[in-house]
Amino acid sequence: MAYGLPPAVPAAGSTSAVKQVKLDRECELRIEVGNETPLRLRLLSGTAEIFGTELPPEIWLTFPPRHKFAVFTWYGAVVELDGDTETDYTADETPMVSYVNVHAVLDGRRSRARASPPESDSSQGPRVIVVGPIDSGKSTLSRMLLSWAAKQGWKPTFIDLDIGQGAITLPGCIAATPIELPIDPVEGVPLDMPLVYFYGHTTPSNNVDLYKVLVKELADILERQFAGNVESRAAGMVINTMGWIEGVGYELLQHAISTFNANVVLVLGQEKLFSMLKKDVSKNNPTVDVVKLQKSGGVVSRHVKFRQRTRSYRIKASHLFYSLSNDLSPHANIANFSDLSIYRIGGGPQAPHSALPIGAKSVADPLRLAPVNINRELLHVVLAVSFAKEPEEIISSNVAGFIYVTDIDIQRKKITYLAPSPGDLPGKFLIMGSLTWLET
């Protein structure tokens, strides 16, 4: 999801003067922070929100460079900006009324679920999955629905299946976490209690079978948690998905809908996808509601290089190495080669199905665990630290966190890595994918 100036409108020059912006009711200010310096923003009067989270009055919020967001007001507001903006403009045509109407329907379903006997099927609250093509506003709509629900006192579960960007933790992961408070407009989703599975790549095409297995593992754990927690069950879940919606991507969307037993499918920005899902999902389960929603006019397509830069920034600012405000720093640690066991799932990169001869199938086992020799090729690689106690538990185990390899000393058989905290790692088994990061 990206907010910014529509391509057809010339971009305004960067501005850095302090200025006030008056917003009329049901209007929004769309902002792209400059490339070099942060932007400060505060609410002077009225009420306004950023992606469903209300702005506190008279308190400065600091947004990092290249951050894109929108300030929306239901009744009118005045905000003040201090710093560089690549673009900022107001818009009076937004789909917010339709979005908040969806929230009201979901809120009603949660209340009915909470009032139902715990052992009955009607005690299950809404399980919402948000789908659509790349840059259609899926992650932003997910944040709105979660923050609005939290504001009403619910604790919905946020599930992120978009391994390309990573809304909860690093790219290359699928993850879930309860949302107890409206999501912070700067820091994003809290990482107090995340349940994270490491896929290791930024596209499912690298290993489709592994992606499906991890989605199923996450769904099974959440199902068990919901069975024992009446409040979580009634609050339900909001599932953010990737933007790959054709071919195998469409198959994976259907897999996610059925695996999580979603009962509401929100389709953003594409009539064809809505029509296909309306037909296919209703055929399998007529009780599932498939709803078409308009995408915001503030959504713009992001260039591949921009998405790559965003991905790198997400790795740095994911609370695992550095914080957005740079008030945290990672710890350098050294371990012996013998203290660690590194595995790759699937036995290494595989050619996509499209690259194989017609009728041919890959002979590689997509779930095979392959030991990885520690050598200089591990430099700048991000590794996941598994909770597994034995190698055969790696695929079914979630991860404790991540390390970033900064040096390999072959002679002394020592590996140097960055971790969020000092001390020994919580496990000896590490998982390697294709995720790398060059610190800048």
Image (spheres, rainbow, N blue to C red):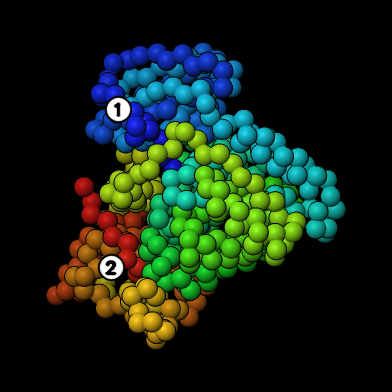
Nearer to me, 321 or 287 = 287
- How many residues crowd mark 2 within 10 Å: few (<14), some (14–19), many (20+)? some
| Location of residue 288 in the rendering, given as x and y in whole percent from the top left corner | 71, 55
Nearer to me, 51 or 184 = 51
Q: Is residue 426 visible?
A: no
Residue carrying label 2: 335
Does residue 128 sit above or below 344 in this rendering?
Answer: above
Amino acid on which disc 1 is placed: Pro
| Location of residue 186 in the rendering, given as x and y in whole percent from the top left corner | 43, 35
Q: What residue lies at 75% left-to-right and 44% top-to-bottom?
A: 109
Amino acid on which disc 2 is placed: Ala
Disc 2 on helix, strand or loop? strand
Does residue 237 appear left or right of residue 352 in this picture? right
Q: Earlier in the sequence, mark 2 or mark 1?
A: 1
Disc 1 on helix, strand or loop? loop
**Viewer-nearest of labels 2 and 1?**
1
Name the quarter where the N terminus is drawn: top left
Does residue 289 appear left or right of residue 293 in this picture? right
| Location of residue 283 in the rendering, given as x and y in whole percent from the top left corner | 70, 63
Q: What residue lies at 72% left-to-right and 39% top-to-bottom?
A: 105
Does residue 105 sit above or below 350 in this rendering?
Answer: above
Q: What residue lies at 74% left-to-right and 44% top-to-bottom?
A: 110
Outermost residue to the left? 411
Contact flag, marks 2 and 1 (Cβ < 8 Å):
no
Q: What residue lies at 32% left-to-right and 66% top-to-bottom?
A: 434
Q: Is residue 386 visible?
A: yes
Which mark is on residue 10?
1
**Cα–Cα span, label 2 and label 1:** 53 Å
